[in-house]
Amino acid sequence: MSNPYEGIQEWVQQLPEFVQPIGVAVAGMIPYVEGEGASGIGIILGINPFVAAIAAMVGNFLSVLAVVVVSSRVRERVVAHRGGGAEAADPAPAPSARRAKGQRRLQGWLSRFGVPGASLLAPLALPTQLTAAFFAASGVDRKRVLLWQGVAIALWTVVVSLVATWLVGVLGW
């Protein structure tokens, strides 16, 4: 079987070595691609699996960090605004049916398994950025959200990186 990625692998290998992990980290910041997708893509494109995994985790975590900081600040302002005697803000527009279903599933996991379990399971339903925003907006402590999202990012990225490395070896890519 010939390698369908040969052309892009050659292009990636021509990039300076310091640029390759930056590209993987940027890809890790994209919801639904995240650490696991970015790492797998990097490995398939010929980047060292360890470097690809670390860069993908860093990119994914940095985006989650930004989301948690912004979401928790917004929540603090809303709570302070409501607590100060002012009327509640206009309700947010209704989420799409698909997103509402994911939020209900995440809320169920949060109630049933707590932040650790929900963080580890959530990548099956929603991107880590949305999960982190939901937790922070729900009032979960920032440090707790970041800890468990970091654990989930590391775990899922390592699993996918190992599978991608194995597949590349088996398929000869």
Image (cartoon, rainbow, N blue to C red):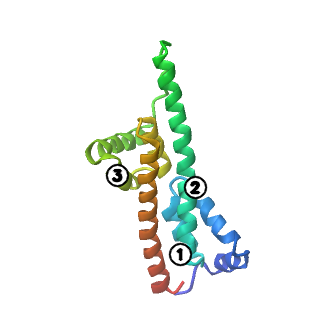
- Residue 110 on image: x %, y %: 32, 44
Mark 2 secondary-structure assignment = loop
- Residue 8 on image: x %, y %: 66, 75
- Residue 10 on image: x %, y %: 68, 80
Taking depth in this image into account, of 38 and 146 the one nearest to the observer is 146
- Residue 140 on image: x %, y %: 40, 39
For residue 132, above or below residue 92: below
Q: Which residue is mark 3?
A: 116
Amino acid type of the residue tagged 1 in the rendering: Phe
* Residue depicted at 41% across the width and 47% down the height: 144
C-alpha distance separating marks 3 and 1: 25 Å
- The dot on residue 50 is 1
Q: Closer to the N terminus: mark 3 or mark 1?
A: 1
Mark 3 secondary-structure assignment = helix
Q: Which residue is mark 2?
A: 29
* Residue depicted at 50% across the width and 81% down the height: 168
Amino acid type of the residue tagged 3 in the rendering: Pro
* Residue depicted at 53% across the width and 59% down the height: 33
Report if residue 89 is visible in the image: no
| Quarter of the figure that contains the C terminus | bottom right
Amino acid type of the residue tagged 2 in the rendering: Met
Contact (Cβ within 8 Å) of mark 2 with mark 1: no
